[in-house]
Amino acid sequence: MNNIYAIIFDLDGVICSTDQYHYLAWKALADRLGIYFDEEINGQLRGVSRMESLEIVLGKHSSDYSAEEKMALAAEKNEIYKSYLASITPGDLSKEVRMTLHTLRQRGYLLAIGSSSKNTKQILTQLGLGQFFDAIADGTMITKSKPDPEVFLLAASMLGVSPENAIVIEDAESGIRAAKAGRFRAIGIKSDGNDPDSDITIKSLKNLIDIL
């Protein structure tokens, strides 16, 4: 692709997968509250912020809790989730992802993370990628979650490039919509959550090497 100088990656589902940890943490919270929660409901949480996810989990019970109580519940879920994250090691980074990232680096691309997760830096550090990316924009730095483009625009700004000169790599519909809203070109990694508006869809991250 011409005039592409930077690549911005979503974290979860692209660089690594912590979906199961999220599921277990939400499940533990829901069980404690006596609220039904299963894999199908969990699927609605992909690419959604923590507080929006909580509203989905609470469902019809949402009105039972005050704003302060909801903040406490979200924090409780995050602490459970972080306890699972403690088990992540560099060995959990797939050879395919590692090879792709290093190949793109050797080709001279600027590389960044654009993730709504507030645990992004912890995850990257535990994967051995804490110092690898040129910029990290995450949930601690933004006020609007995807599909708002804020996190990707921030990542591009941190890299010093315009959206027209960057590609976003995503696996979720909300992420693709965010990329397009920010005027980025968007590459979707094939999944049930892909948005048809992605410019290109690839089967796995390693396919980037063939098209860039």
Image: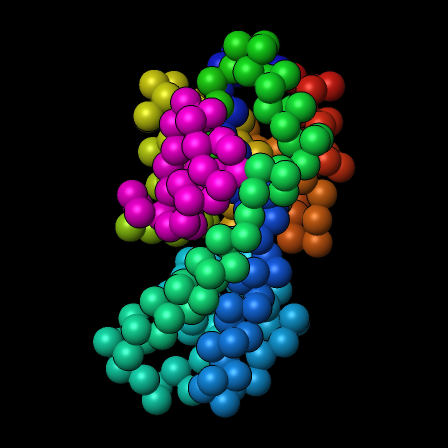
Query: In percent of the image, x 52 and y 76: which residue is there?
Result: 28
> Among all residues in the image, which is located at the extreme left?
68
Horizontal and vertical percent position of residue 10: 52, 40
Quarter of the image with the N terminus is: top right
Q: Would residue 197 be visible to someone looking at this image?
A: no
Q: Is residue 116 above or below residue 9?
A: below
- The quadrant the C terminus occupies is top right
Residue 41 place in picture, x, y as percent: 60, 72
Is residue 102 in the magenta section? no
How many badges with numbers are in the image? 0
- The answer to whether 172 appears left or right of 48 in the picture is right
Residue pictured at 63% horizontal, 76% vertical: 38
**Which residue is nearer to you in this view: 204 or 200?**
204
In the rendered image, the vertical position of residue 2 relative to residue 113, given as above or below: above
Q: Is residue 3 left or right of residue 197?
A: left
In the image, is residue 158 above or below residue 106?
below
Q: Quadrant of residue 54?
A: bottom left
When asked about the image quadrant of residue 161, the answer is top left
Residue at the spot 37% in from the left edge and 71% down from the top edge: 76
Task: Work out whether residue 151 or residue 84 is closer to the camera in this orientation and state it.
Answer: 84
Q: x, y percentage for residue 73?
A: 36, 74
Residue 123 painted magenta: yes
Which residue is found at the position 73% from the left and 19% from the top? 210
In magenta, the rendered stretch is 114-142
Residue 142 can be seen, yes or no: yes
Q: Identify the image's colour scheme: rainbow, by chain, secondary structure or one colour.
A: rainbow
Q: Is residue 111 above or below residue 32?
A: above
Q: Position of residue 158 (x, y in %)?
A: 33, 25
